[in-house]
Amino acid sequence: MIRPELLAPAGKFDCFNAAVNAGADAVYLAGKEFGARASAENFTQEELLKALDIAHLRNVKIYLTLNTLIKEREWDKIEPFLRPLYDNGLDGVIIQDLGLIPYLKSDFEDLPIHASTQMSVTGPYAADMLKKSGVVRIVPARELSLDEIISLKDSSGLEIETFIHGAMCYCYSGRCLFSSYLGGRSGNRGRCAQPCRLNYTITKGDKYIEKDSIKYPLSLKDMCTITCLDKLIDAGIDSFKIEGRMKSPQYVAGVTSVYRKYIDMYMEDHELKIDNADIELLNKLYIRTGLGEGYYFRHNGPEMITKLNPSYNESDDKTDQIMSERYVHPVPKTKVMGVATLVADDNVNLIIKCNDTVVTVEGDMVQKAQNRPLTKEEVIKQLNKTGESLFEFDRIEVEMDDDCFMPVKALNELRRNGFEKLKEALSNGH
């Protein structure tokens, strides 16, 4: 049985923190350009590099959404935008524009390429073409049934990534021109105005029909697959994707944590027992009126439409507060162990261990105490002041003489140098 990757969205850095803390295996996000959610806050180049550092220290992957259609005048911007991320270990790029494939294979040879759902891949011929071009993962059209997805995976041999939760587009695979026609805002350029969520009057000739029973005929219910997650896991899907780069950090945290819980449960027990409290939580997290399973087990139908109310049910303040305290506000940090050795008239020594990686740094000379010597508790307290570092000590052991003294500044410098050396060692091993 394949353990599926849990892939969470991040439209800004707080969402990234929430996704990592809540247990995502991977996060998809965008820079300020080329992502299909231009209205999201998105990430500066500095934030993208910081996210890569944090993610890789936590064994989380980062996929960059480069999934708009690229204009001719924009090609020269791609290389300087992508190069630093590629050099820093970017784990994959999600694209819609076929023209990007040969460009990426030429200039970024080892960068895994994922075909976005906007490519509308529905069968073996398209999958085979993309595989020969160098694509390693497909996000199929959302309109495929589970049986069709299984067939596509079996025939192509490619990794398959499918949506498991979040908003659904009425248009086929999200390739909508409605917003462009109405207001010049292209969904394929990340600027959809969501006209499908508006109230429409249905007429036949000059007569109104179903005026009271359907006011929002184009607004699909949100997808929620938590109750059929076992079937999706059994199907061998490689990556489960949560929609929501426009959503709040609390949404990202709550949805990711719930799916993390039940993926782990099924992988361990081969049984899915859904707690009603988790269903209630998902319903509180900015869900559009009504939930459904998408197209996995149906072709289409009126039960997939919200009909009377397309707006989101806002989560309550208590839910937001719980998600914030538990997942959003803590900066994701990597647990390490440390051993500090202080011997008078010798250099202080710090060993830091993270999993199988061990680094050693030396600091300033340890002095003999003239008045009150340092205590082990004081050394531990100072080394534990990790601030905004990507690491924190799970345990620190201190071996020291009874008459030692060191300035606080020297201990701080020792910790900083140790963490920097550890970061470098872990990055080289990624």
Image (tube, helix red, strand yellow):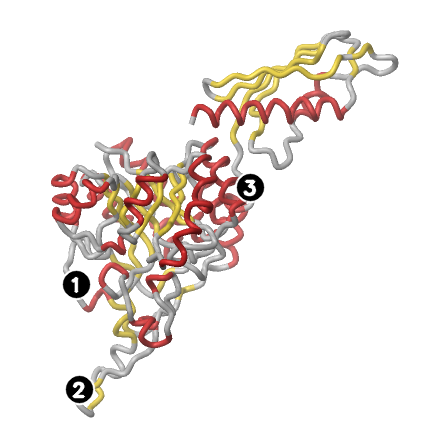
Q: Which mark is residue 204?
A: 2
Pick whichever of labels 3 and 1 is earlier in the sequence: 1
Query: Horizontally, is 263 left or right of 401 in the view?
Result: left
Quarter of the image with the C terminus is: top left
Number of marks present in the image shown: 3
**Residue at horizontal 27 percent and vertical 62 percent from the top:** 175
Q: Which mark is residue 300?
A: 1
Q: Identify the amino acid type marked 3.
A: Pro
Disc 3: CA contacts within 10 A as few (<14), some (14-19) or many (>=20): few
Q: Residue furthest bottom?
A: 206
Query: Horizontally, is 196 left or right of 204 in the view?
Result: right
Query: Horizontally, is 252 left or right of 259 in the view?
Result: right
Mark 2 and mark 1 in contact (Cβ < 8 Å)?
A: no
Q: Identify the amino acid type marked 1.
A: Asn
Disc 2: CA contacts within 10 A as few (<14), some (14-19) or many (>=20): few
Q: Which residue is mark 3?
A: 330
The correct choice, above or below, for 344 with respect to 203 in the image is above
Instruction: Give x and y (percent) for residue 16.
Output: 47, 45
Q: Identify the amino acid type marked 2.
A: Lys
Q: Which mark is residue 142?
A: none
